[in-house]
Image (spheres, grey):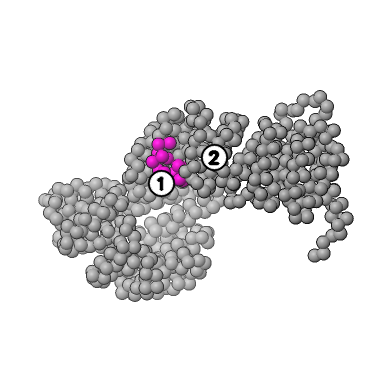
């Protein structure tokens, strides 16, 4: 497009400047009139840095000005006009210099802001910083000047220089706004290049908040978050402890501690428990704790927390769906169905539409699974028909395919999975694994193995494929192949507890190399100490080694945490061998009610010639 003539461009620029100056004049107070302290302001928030400084760093400035009408001289007008013209012609640096002169003459915050914008157009962070500091010097009480200075310093990665401005910002911010400001600070400084320095800087800047009992809990939480981002979980735990000591009712330290729960951090969980014992404990913290327990495979403890939460706050939807999921895993089908239906009833009250959709999809899938277990295939399909979420298309259709396969329509089930669209690599892999699972459930082990062999040959370092291939090789009685695959998986993923557990259990189950089996399973226990299935393997190898009392102790504890039919089969056999046959039969009957078709349970009963 042909550029407009210079005269028109000059006129346009002059019009823009006149509009700016007219707006400036409207903000000038009448002579001898005091400023209105109640006048609304729009302070610029601290924004997250995005690399080198850009004009986006600057937010809208305060509309206040200390200029007087006499400042609106022809010389000022000329400086502003030429500054804008110079910047528009491509020389933002000189334009910024002219604009800064006008800003200093008028002390108008908008002209200081415009100076910063012009400097940032040329990615000149130092010039922008000089303009922001000139603004702050002219108006020491301007929060916008201080905040923009902070933004630029963070963007320039000059974190050490932000201590005093950040401290002043907290001092000037009303106490009620401190939680929001600390959230912004944590998010902003977490993106700094030197994360350890960022944590140290924020700690120094929050020295006054740390000393104040009303804000100490939140201040230490902010510091702890930054320490955690910096790869210092011990430092984060120390911050959580100090925060709770300063304010036992603050939820911040407890929320931070939830993220720190780990066998290597034994002092984190007590922080959460102490907070939950206070009268004003927030349900969100208990929900987070329950999730952490579930992720640690401490299912019984997680269910207990969720049950408590559903009693205290029966109107909250989220606890019901997680509780229903855990109950379904534990084969408590009637309780699971009640919980999931309660979630469906409450879900429409959720404000977040995406969260509601995800939760409903999970609930419908689980309800379909429960119906399938009792062979109510029509009911299972009806639950699936309620799902309206394209993001879970693969999961929904895989469940539909499972229903077909359970009714003897394996080929139709495979065709259904194959017809699914592949929007990305994850969809493709999920489709593949869903088809393999159909074959495994139908005991079509050779076709499943052939599919996995082809896939793992194409992706030899895919740990999921290696593990599944090893498990199918075991079903085909190819024990050498299974062992080779699992050792390859351990080589690729030394922290894969499932590989150690599977190999150790296989050796123990076949009564070969039992000491090696125990060593492998003990390694799995170290990696996942709260996994009841790994504990089951350890109990089983102790039984094979003849350590009946230890085996019984381990298996009883595992079964208490997770009353799974396979764990029940092993516990019952140990009890049977120890002469506690009534207790053994009771355990087997309980497991049979949950899943009468479980292979391990049926094989155990047949081998011991037990009829329930």
- The kind of secondary structure element at disc 2 is helix
Residue at the image point whose x is 24% and y is 55% from the top = 521
Q: Mark 1 points at which residue?
A: 291
- In the picture, the disc for residue 160 is 2
Q: Where is residue 204 in the image (x, y as percent from the top left)?
A: 51, 34
Q: Quadrant of residue 488?
A: bottom left
Q: Is residue 90 left or right of residue 44?
A: right
Q: Does the magenta stretch include residue 237?
A: yes
Q: Between 142 and 106, which is closer to the camera in this rendering?
A: 106
User: Could you tell me how many numbered marks the image carries?
Assistant: 2
Q: Which of 212 and 40 is in front in this view?
A: 212
Q: Earlier in the sequence, mark 1 or mark 2?
A: 2
Q: Residue 443 carries which label?
A: none
Q: Is residue 222 left or right of residue 1?
A: left
Report the magenta residues as a range: 226-239
How far separated are the C-alphas under marks 1 and 2?
Answer: 38 Å
Q: Residue 458 in the image: x percent, y percent?
A: 40, 73
Q: At 39% from the left edge and 51% from the top edge, which residue is drawn?
A: 325
Q: Is the magenta stretch mostly helix, strand or loop?
A: helix
Residue 53: give x, y in percent of width and height.
63, 49
Instruction: Estimate how packed mark 2 is, as few (under 14), some (14 to 19) or many (20 or more) residues with alpha carbons within 10 Å.
Output: some
Question: Is residue 238 visible from the viewing direction of this image?
Answer: yes
- Where is 389 relative to 153, above or below? below
Q: Which residue sits at x=33%, y=51%?
A: 330
- Left or right: residue 531 versus residue 226 is left
**Which residue is at 72% across, 49% downward?**
93
Q: Vertically, is 105 above or below 544?
A: above
């Amino acid at each position: 497009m042909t550029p407009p003539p210079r005269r028109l461009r000059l006129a346009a620029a002059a019009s823009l400047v006149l509009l700016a100056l007219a707006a400036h004049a409207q903000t000038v107070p009448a002579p001898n009139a005091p400023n209105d302290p109640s006048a609304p302001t729009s302070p610029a928030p601290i924004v997250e840095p995005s690399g080198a400084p850009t004009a986006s760093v600057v937010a809208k400035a305060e509309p206040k000005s200390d200029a007087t009408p006499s400042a609106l001289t022809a010389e000022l007008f000329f400086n502003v006009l030429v500054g804008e013209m110079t910047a528009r012609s491509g020389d933002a640096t000189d334009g910024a210099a002219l604009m800064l002169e006008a800003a200093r003459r008028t002390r108008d915050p908008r002209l200081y802001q415009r100076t910063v914008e012009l400097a940032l157009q040329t990615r000149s962070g130092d010039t922008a910083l000089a303009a922001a500091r000139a603004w702050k010097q002219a108006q020491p009480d301007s929060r916008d000047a201080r905040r923009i200075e902070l933004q630029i310093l963070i963007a320039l990665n000059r974190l050490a220089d932000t201590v005093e401005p950040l401290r002043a910002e907290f001092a000037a911010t009303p106490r009620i706004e401190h939680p929001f400001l600390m959230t912004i600070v944590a998010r902003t400084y977490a993106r700094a290049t030197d994360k350890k320095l960022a944590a140290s800087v924020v700690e120094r800047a929050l020295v006054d908040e740390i000393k104040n009992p009303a804000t100490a809990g939140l201040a230490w939480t902010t510091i702890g978050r930054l320490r955690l981002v910096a790869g210092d979980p011990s430092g984060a735990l120390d911050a959580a402890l100090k925060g709770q000591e300063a304010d036992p009712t603050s939820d911040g330290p407890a929320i931070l501690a939830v993220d720190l729960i780990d066998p290597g951090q034994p002092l984190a969980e007590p922080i959460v428990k102490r907070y939950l014992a206070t009268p004003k404990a927030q349900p969100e913290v208990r929900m987070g704790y329950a999730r952490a327990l579930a992720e640690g495979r401490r299912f019984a403890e997680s269910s207990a927390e969720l049950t408590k939460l559903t009693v205290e706050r029966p109107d909250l939807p989220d606890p019901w769906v997680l509780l229903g999921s855990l109950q379904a895993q534990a084969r408590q089908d009637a309780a699971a169905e009640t919980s999931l239906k309660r979630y469906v009833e409450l879900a429409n009250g959720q404000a977040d539409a995406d969260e509601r959709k995800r939760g409903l999809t999970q609930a419908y899938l689980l309800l379909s699974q429960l119906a399938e277990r009792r062979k109510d295939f029509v009911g299972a399909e009806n639950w699936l028909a309620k799902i309206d979420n394209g993001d879970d298309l693969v999961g929904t259709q895989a469940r539909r395919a499972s229903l077909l396969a359970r009714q003897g329509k394996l080929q139709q089930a495979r065709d259904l999975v194959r017809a699914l669209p592949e929007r990305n690599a994850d969809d493709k892999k999920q489709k593949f694994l869903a088809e393999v699972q159909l074959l495994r459930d139908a005991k079509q082990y050779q076709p499943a193995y052939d599919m996995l062999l082809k896939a793992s040959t194409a992706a030899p370092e895919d740990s999921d494929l290696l593990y599944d291939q090893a498990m199918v090789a075991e079903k085909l009685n190819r024990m050498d192949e299974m062992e080779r695959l699992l050792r390859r998986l351990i080589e690729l993923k030394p922290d894969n507890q499932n590989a150690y557990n599977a190999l150790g259990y296989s050796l123990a189950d076949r009564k070969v190399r039992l000491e090696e089996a125990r060593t492998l399973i003990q390694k799995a226990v170290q990696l996942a100490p709260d996994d009841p299935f790994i504990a089951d393997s350890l109990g089983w190898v102790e039984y094979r080694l003849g350590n009946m009392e230890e085996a019984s102790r381990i298996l009883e504890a595992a079964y208490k945490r997770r009353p799974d039919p396979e764990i029940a089969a092993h516990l019952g056999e140990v009890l049977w061998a120890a002469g506690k046959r009534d207790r053994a039969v009771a355990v087997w009957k309980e497991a049979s009610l949950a899943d009468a078709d479980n292979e391990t349970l049926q094989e155990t009963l047949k081998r011991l010639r037990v009829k329930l």
